[in-house]
Amino acid sequence: MGKRLSAGQRRATILEAAKALFAESGLHGVSVDAIAERLAVSPATLYKHFASKEALYEAVINATACSRESYVDAVLRGPSDFASVLRRIARTFVDSVAADPDFLRMEMHAVLEGNPFAGRFFENRWKHFSDYIELGIRELAPQGKAAPVDVPSASLMFQGMLREVLYVKCVYRSERYRDIPLHQLVDRCIDLFLLAIGYRERCLEGAA
Amino acid sequence: MAEFDAELDARGLNCPLPILRAKKSINELQAGQVLKIVATDPGAVKDFEAFCKQTGHELMNSQEQGSEFVFLIRKH
């Protein structure tokens, strides 16, 4: 680490290196010494910026939270029906995760480690979809635009589906799905999801 | 806080729902009319700034009132 870095730049460099290590091995699998070694600095240098490894981990999570996806553009750039908005916010989300798959790896480790702080963060990251889907189905079903499905299960199904798409495309890089572009795979899964919830808003609109 | 022509209760909703609801509510207003939005998601502050920037509507006021965020948006 060069001496000419500002405090902010040093902090950013530390966060970046720590994130990569936490993504590889989780909070408990990484020592302060390992982070210091990756950065070619002494542990004392790290402690100047972060009081503990746990504080550094929380800073990594918070930095990710601050750069959360903006769905404003996704909402504004097309039709407002349930399915169209769902497709656009899903694309925004997968693009963001695909650009930085460390998010997924950290989430996997957090699940295994049972870290409550990280657990809340990752749950919130998916909450946009849970809330959107649950409220959407609750409004559509009484109008006959969706089947009266079990709403929390439908939301969970969507989340599991999208997470699995991200795993096979961005983490495992599975051969089985190699030839299907990410957006196409997401769209195909959303098609299946819409079938599963008996979505027929467009049919009704078309008939009107 | 200034007068308004329509009100949107977005309390308890997380992005993208407040933006989506606001988009639909503003579509029902005439140019120059004002929509008041009450939200609880802290992310709504940045979201409504971006919303107005992208749509050309005027963000007349953005206030934090306790645990709520109140926005006044004039349709362009």
Image (cartoon, coloured by chain):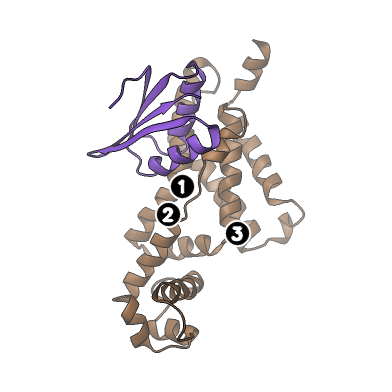
Chain colours: A brown, B purple
Q: Position of residue B31 (x, y in %)?
A: 50, 18
Determine the CA span between mark 3 and mark 1.
17 Å
Residue position for label 3: A99
Q: Position of residue A127 (x, y in %)?
A: 43, 44
Q: Neighbour class for label 1 at 10 Å: few (<14), some, many (≥20)?
A: some
Identify the residue at horizontal 40%, vertical 86% (top origin): A33
Question: Secondary structure beneath disc 2?
Answer: helix
Q: Chain of mark 3?
A: A
Mark 3 or mark 1, earlier in chain: 3
Q: Going by the image, does A162 lie left or right of A177?
A: left
**Mark 3 or 1: the one toward you:** 3
Question: Secondary structure beneath disc 3?
Answer: helix
Q: Are marks 1 and 2 in contact (CB under 8 Å)?
A: yes
Q: Going by the image, does B12 lie left or right of A164?
A: left
Q: Is residue A57 visible?
A: yes
Determine the CA span between mark 2 and mark 3.
17 Å
**Same chain letter for marks 3 and 1:** yes
Mark 2 or mark 3, earlier in chain: 3
Name which quarter of the figure residue B48 lies in: top left
Q: Quadrant of the C terminus of chain A?
A: top right
Residue type, numbered disc 2: Phe
Q: Nearer the viewer, residue A56 or A109?
A: A56
Residue position for label 2: A122
Q: Going by the image, does A187 lie left or right of A147?
A: right
Residue position for label 1: A126
**Same chain letter for marks 2 and 3:** yes
**Same chain letter for marks 1 and 2:** yes
Q: Chain of mark 2?
A: A
Residue type, numbered disc 1: Trp
